[in-house]
Image (tube, grey):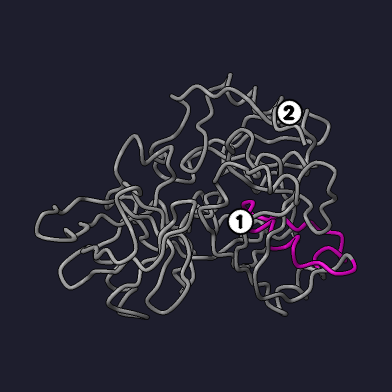
Amino acid sequence: MDLSAFAFDLPEELIALRPVEPQDAARLLVVHGDGRLEDAGVRDLPRYLSAGDTLVFNDTRVIPAALKGTRLARDSAGSDISIDANLVERVGPSTWRALARPGKRLKPGDRVVFGEGFEAEITGKAESGEITLDFNVEGEALDLALDAFGAMPLPPYIARRRAADGKDRETYQTSFAGDEAESVAAPTAGLHFTPRLRATIVDAGIDSETVRLHVGLGTFAPLKESQLESGRLHEEWRRVSPEVAERLNGVRSAGHRVVPVGTTALRTLESSVEGGKLVPTVGPTDIFLKPGDRLQVTDALVTNFHLPESSLFMLVCALMGTEVMQAAYAHAIKEKYRFYSYGDACLLLP
């Protein structure tokens, strides 16, 4: 697979550092399968869907996974150092894997204090630099400590230009997030769906369902050669309930469209198919959708704009065709759409 086919140049000023207010005021680029493009707004979405169509949302909740701490001196001759840690995967009641800076100055056995009464021991370090943190609290107490001392884990292209703040607690969490705080990145297409927009969708006769995929940082990480060769991505946990699978199969049998909101909802659905039908699913998926793959239960997609040479841009090219999506992105850049997590949206209609 030649990654250069999925490259494009994006002016840095088009990377959105904050969402528009209100968040349903974002722009919407409507991309048709024949290449036609329409400039619209997210609030116009019901005009492009029909009564009986069903939007499918990922209702995962983002954990405040960005932590600032102090690695304590190892001996009387040493000194404390400040570190930044981003939790990436829960591996036990008190244990998370994390990315940390400065990674070269951390090793197993180090103690890190993140707040009063909240600390961890580094119990492992991978060759990639990823560390394992064993906290001094677990379960619900750990969740409360993260809520008290953590910040929203903004993507690197935002975090390197500004720090997360209290406003991100609202704007980087969907209004319909469920009760499991396990994601370390937001399902960002869902951020546009304010209660007002969702009410408008209901009034238009458009239905909604929810699935759940806990988003890992790997979703946004640069592709590795091994992933291109294997055709598989990092694993993320997902769930499709029996009731949702049955209802969505009924939607398509009745001639209506199933429309995932975001690539995480799409990957959840497409990894839960047997014999062309959705089936109930609980567990990990490493599905990697790219041009040449046939999407089986996705009829349209609401999504944000994605990074060049990423698995997410390859996914939308699988749905619409690479030439169509490259032309759409060129138009979006020319018209100064806002890109990435806090940016504008696309409606893809193959």
Q: Does 264 appear in magenta?
A: yes
Q: Secondary structure at mark 2?
A: helix
Residue 285 found in image quarter: bottom right
At 68% from the left and 60% from the top, the residue drawn is 286
Q: Is residue 290 above or below residue 94?
A: above
Q: Residue 80: x, y in percent?
A: 15, 54
> Crowding at label 2, few (<14), some or many (≥20) Cα neighbours within 10 Å?
few
Question: Nearer the N terminus, badge 1 or badge 2?
Answer: 2
Residue nearer the viewer, 145 or 14: 145
Given the image, on which type of amino acid does mark 2 rest? Ala
Q: Which residue is mark 2?
A: 5
At 75% from the left and 51% from the top, the residue drawn is 230
Q: Secondary structure at mark 1?
A: helix
**Magenta-drawn segment:** 251-275
Using the image, tell me which numbered label, if any, was put on residue 288: none
Q: Does 75 appear in magenta?
A: no
Given the image, on which type of amino acid does mark 1 rest? Ile
At 63% from the left and 40% from the top, the residue drawn is 310
Q: Which residue is mark 1?
A: 201
Q: Residue 289: x, y in percent?
A: 75, 49
Residue nearer the viewer, 32 or 104: 104
Quarter of the figure with the N terminus? top right
Q: Is residue 144 above or below residue 176?
A: below
